[in-house]
Amino acid sequence: MARTQPEVTTSVGEVPRPRHLPAAFTAVELADRLWAPRQRVVRERTVPFLYGQMEKIGTIEALEVTKPPGPLAFPYRKNNTSTSVMYWDSDIAKWIETASYTLATHRDPALDALIDDIVARIAMAQEADGYFNSFFQRREPAKKWTNLRDWHELYCLGHMIEAAVAHNQATGKTNLLDIVRRHVDLVARLFGPGEGQRRGYCGHEEIELALVKLSRLTGEQRYLDLARYFIDERGRQPHYFDIEARTRGADPADYWYSTYHYNQSHVPVREQDRVVGHAVRAMYLYCAMADLAAETGDARLLGACRRLWADLNDKRLYVTGGLGPSEHNEGFTTDYDLPNETAYAETCASVGLVFWAHRMTLLESDGRYADVMEQALYNNALSGLSLDGERFFYDNPLASRGSHHRWTWHRCPCCPPNIARLMASLGSYVYSTAPGELAVHLYAESNARLEVDGVAASLKQTTNYPWEGTVELAVDPAMPIEFTLRLRLPGWCRSATLAINGQMLDTKALTERGYACLRRRWQSGDKVTLTLAMPVERLYAHPDVHADQGRVALKRGPIVYCVEAVDTSAPPHRLALPRDEAVTSRLEPDLLGGIATLSGTALAAEPVDPALYRTEPWPARRVPFKAVPYHVWDHREAGEMVVWLREA
Amino acid sequence: MARTQPEVTTSVGEVPRPRHLPAAFTAVELADRLWAPRQRVVRERTVPFLYGQMEKIGTIEALEVTKPPGPLAFPYRKNNTSTSVMYWDSDIAKWIETASYTLATHRDPALDALIDDIVARIAMAQEADGYFNSFFQRREPAKKWTNLRDWHELYCLGHMIEAAVAHNQATGKTNLLDIVRRHVDLVARLFGPGEGQRRGYCGHEEIELALVKLSRLTGEQRYLDLARYFIDERGRQPHYFDIEARTRGADPADYWYSTYHYNQSHVPVREQDRVVGHAVRAMYLYCAMADLAAETGDARLLGACRRLWADLNDKRLYVTGGLGPSEHNEGFTTDYDLPNETAYAETCASVGLVFWAHRMTLLESDGRYADVMEQALYNNALSGLSLDGERFFYDNPLASRGSHHRWTWHRCPCCPPNIARLMASLGSYVYSTAPGELAVHLYAESNARLEVDGVAASLKQTTNYPWEGTVELAVDPAMPIEFTLRLRLPGWCRSATLAINGQMLDTKALTERGYACLRRRWQSGDKVTLTLAMPVERLYAHPDVHADQGRVALKRGPIVYCVEAVDTSAPPHRLALPRDEAVTSRLEPDLLGGIATLSGTALAAEPVDPALYRTEPWPARRVPFKAVPYHVWDHREAGEMVVWLREA
């Protein structure tokens, strides 16, 4: 049903790049020791656990819109009159999306029936005109569409669209899809440039990318048009949120954040060049911008994406792939402002960055994007989910004094189903295809059933990545066929070797924008061997990152490490790693699900003197330490943690 | 009128130390280039400026208690139902105290009349039973004595007592003194262990030390008894603040700070051994404890003072003499928690530390206390007042990105008159006397008219301290007399030489607890020369002060330095000072009132690469920098400031 895919260029002379489409999440079976167990735990533990939590706090019961509402489980916040209860529908939607992904690979009649039951409740609640939102219907029926700025109404629908798409793809059912399409039709009647229509868009972006997904699934142009309308309208003057505020009798100036940077509507999106405001909203917006650039060939949208990408990556991204340092706006602040102990770096924001980076990767065929996708995925995003699948980080600081822990629930439980849906659909991030091309973006032991130019092709990855750097790829097309196999050469890797069927290749000559491009007539039995040198690296932050000056982060492959108190005999804040001290890696299959750890010796200042200040440096002793991947911290004895170690 | 002064010992075999009394503030004329200009600016600018501000915001008009109150200038705070308006009387009191000190040395009939006018208004307002508090009388007459925990009622009286004492000492007048004595008599009837009396004490300590002052001035034991009652009662169970809350129909548990650590009433004061809670309150309490130990010989009170002193100095004091790192409680947090950029370090808290350290100095004749008095005075406290006397720091961070500035007024304007009254009375901190002893605690060019064992003795200090380390003391008794001249040898000084009339002395042999003790028959014309080596020192913080690891503070003599952006070609956060790099000092008479600056060369990391992270350290260039005394920062171009420079 897919429409014709335009190519996109933004500057004269730029070679159009073939637009890649991701592998279906059902087409890839992960068999590695990192992601596969996480997918299993999401399926077996997180999905039932999240459902139980939603039942417990009332999220499920809230769907009974004809019953009188009970007391508000979470009170309205003082400043912006919002409450997390108003986006409970989105929690349900992300749960359905996650559950659907798991169903696609692991049949589970009870889960299937449970989803259908929820869908039936939603169907019961849906109004004749297509409207469905449990919060507004049950609690605030008079306030529908009166506060798009703060009240997440289209955001909830957006997530329900994503759920419906996943549910349809996983099960073939249309029960939820039909519901959301009727709601979207209502929205399309209500919003637009026509007479009597509202010029609005949602304060929390999400529906835009969801509408593109719906358009891709259904082949319907009108969904894409609606997404584009929302994107084009955003930030235009006169400003819709001003008009809307006045319409409901409020003063537009009485906005808790003061400016519309918070929701990226301060200027039209094509004029934006700095990542600002709430980080999750920003990521979802940029996803939709990339989607629309891909769908429509809109060079100005792609140009804005590239500028925003550069701004994020050059000035506002944690080494862990976290983003949005401030709790105040759950988002961005100023250039190079990346405090460690108070880093907000919300799990959802990193998940959103994975979404955006994935879209940019497919659109641009440029490894820089996939590098960041990998960085966010393996570090800040994965950190959000405990090994047992039932505890979650909302914020992901890069240093802790020992009191920051994963929680089992949160006032705003957006992160658990967000990391869960990413885990459950991770296969589609690994591979993509385009006419005459097949690309490998991530390395993980797996089996994939893909198709190039209409010919089925299996791909089997054998590797212990990310703990070891050797990857074997067995390519198995149904018939011999010429195509380009694009293999990502990670930006962190300074030495990669490639062989086909034992024959060494000139990697450098084959490399184009971060991908080795192996064009040949592939046939069954072909085997590619990629070896990525994976030494322990020290990373140094830009001189304007205050918090990291004089400090060093340890990284090996895509994995950022941290030192926890349990792994040293001196508190981590006392350690300084000598500049020339060797740090070595070691596989520890029995530790924290099987990881590579780093080991070294640091200098630990010794408080030999009770004085608070003295005129000589404190003496130091040599202290062995171990570092573990940041994403598994806080699984053992509680204590201090640091990512950025001082360097001596 | 002074009562007999007991000696205090706390352990068996401890030699009782003679108790020193400070010089009268009228007896010392400062003639130096640091304090004397500050005293002048307080007299000529700050006193009229503060009066003008109080007129402008309504503090003065608020004394008209029979008129209906206007709208509350500052609304009640959400958590503790307090508003700074409820302690406006204390602002007036501190202003009267400051103005009185200036009157004592510089007659000013208009100012004298202005004070009398305010006193007349207070007299008009005072009720028949002695009560006076403009806030309660005008706004909340039904709430008198109902919330000692939060509402500062006795605190205001305490400051009015201090004002009355200073006013009486400066002018000989008793108009204000009579008013406060009548009020104190009422308080003594209302509070106490007797039947029908309240067992309470103030949530914000202050009246206790004021009552001791009043007792000393009047010779009345009953004021001392009341102070002692408040001190003894504090923190006893059943807890008065619990009882009081229930009495007014509130739940004691519904206290914004949760525990009574906030106001140091969590346990009886003699059992306290950690500095906790609101820092200003803590300092005022400890002052009163030291006062009572001095007045009554209470060894357990002195023991508590010593333990609290050690806790503060070993674990909770900024290198600038600032204290109380947290804005949340305007006070103390955990051991070694001394963040720089977010340091609260309220000016009032440092002023309070000067008060406490002064009392401990006089009580213990131990230079350790005077060292801290000097540290707080020259750095965090002095920082609170601008060179022009009309701008003030409330909080005193040790690092700034350039947006922290002195303000001309504040919601809670407690600091301006606090630093002003300290400046105006500073002479009395320089000298003290005891039977057979005369002590010099601070060095500053000055003339003093003192008395030892009934014999008048002038003392003339000639020095350019704190910028140079040579001090000449001309001792001029009215007749030859034997006494011990105690000269403080600052703890920061590693090499001091002493001579009398050109004859070198064995400094070490004469030194006792931080003071060189020169016992001889002094006669007119005797001259002591003290030379304190004053090299630039690097200070290193205890290994558990997270924020300062890998960093160094520059200090010379008592002065802590900082680097401001205006004095380097690279932003201060990029600088790292090599361990062996020389830092030199230089007098700059024309800069910022005349100071010694430090100069050196640091390494500045250069952002030669737009990357946010790289695997090699950024290259560095050598950058000259200048450092200025912390107390004069933020007087030139706005920009970054750091006290703790990284060390390379």
Image: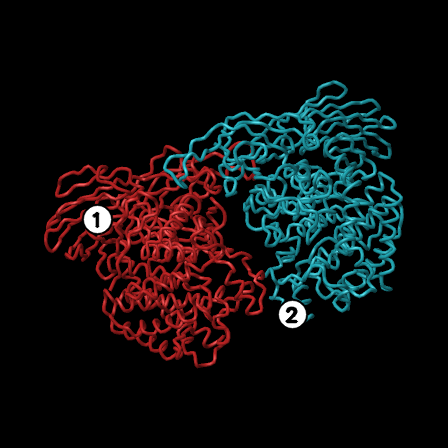
Chain colours: A red, B cyan
Tag 1 subunit: A
Does the CB distance between marks 1 and 2 fall below 8 Å? no
Tag 2 subunit: B
Q: CA distance from mark 1 to mark 2?
A: 66 Å
Read off the residue under disc 2: B250
Examine the image and state in which quarter residue A392 appears.
bottom left
Compared with B193, B20 (above or below) is above
Q: Residues within 10 Å of mark 1 (few under 14, many from 20)?
A: many
Instruction: Point out residue B172 in the picture as x, y percentages from the top left corner.
Output: 89, 46
Compared with A311, B484 (above or below) is above
Q: Residue at image x 75%, y 21%?
A: B500
Instruction: Point out residue A192 in the picture as x, y percentages from the top left corner.
Output: 43, 66
Circle number at residue A463: 1
Q: Residue at image x 89%, y 44%?
A: B109
Q: Is residue A347 visible?
A: no
Q: Residues within 10 Å of mark 2 (few under 14, many from 20)?
A: few
Examine the image and state in which quarter residue A11 appears.
top left
Residue nearest the viewer, comparing B570 with A558? B570
User: Left of A415 or right of it: where is B50?
Assistant: right
Residue nearest the viewer, comparing A32 with B251? A32
Indicate the amino acid at tag 2: Ala
Instruction: Point out residue B435 in the picture as x, y percentages from the top left corner.
Output: 80, 36
Circle number at residue B240: none
